[in-house]
Image: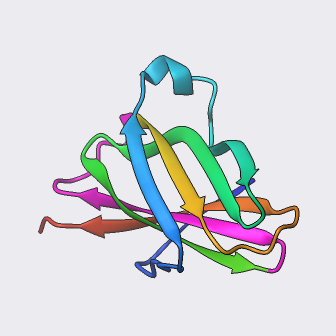
Amino acid sequence: MEYISRPPLLSRGPGLEFSHFSRNLAECMNQSRANVAEARWIGNNKMHIQALGLFVNCACSVGSGGYRVDGDKIILQYEEICNRPKDESCSICEELIYEIKDLERKDYTFEMERITLSNYL
């Protein structure tokens, strides 16, 4: 899975339900990158996607989520909102949940995209 960071361009696709939860850091210790732990279909056109990893810096929090479809790839987006300078030695383990309705039912690959927003000067 590819992992990239870009300027703020959150795609709020239709039919998205997004949630996130902090997890025990031990659950992410073997995750050097964002990882889609589970992707499963619910009915014919709704997909449940669970991503787990060291997504967020300790100086930041998760904001909204988004996604876009590019052929056979779903780009899962999330906002990292920072209220103070980042501490590069500290990350928080997060579970990100995406439920997307009205998708064409086929096999997809996944890419994570972090959108960092800074609220400090």
Q: Position of residue 39 (x, y in %)?
A: 72, 48
Frontmost residue, 13 versus 9? 13
The image quarter containing residue 22 is top left
What residue sits 54% from the left and 27% below the top? 28
Q: Is residue 107 above or below residue 12?
A: above
Residue positioned most to the right: 107
Residue positioned most to the left: 121
Specify whether residue 8 is painted magenta.
no
Is residue 34 in view? Answer: no
In the image, 41: left or right of 30? right
What residue sits 40% from the left and 78% below the top? 8
Q: Is residue 31 above or below residue 115?
A: above
Frontmost residue, 46 versus 66? 46
In the image, 117: left or right of 42? left
Q: Position of residue 114 (x, y in %)?
A: 49, 62
Q: Position of residue 47 (x, y in %)?
A: 68, 58
Protein image colouring: rainbow
Q: Is residue 33 above or below residue 108?
A: above
In the image, 71: left or right of 16? right
The segment highlighted magenta reads 71-91
- Quadrant of the frame with the C terminus: bottom left
Q: Position of residue 91 (x, y in %)?
A: 39, 37
Specify whether residue 73 is painted magenta.
yes
Frontmost residue, 80 versus 16? 16
Q: Is residue 72 above or below residue 27?
A: below
What residue sits 49% from the left and 47% below the top? 96
Report how many numbered discs are placed on residues in the image: 0
The image quarter containing residue 81 is bottom left
Is residue 18 in view? Answer: yes
Residue positioned most to the front: 43
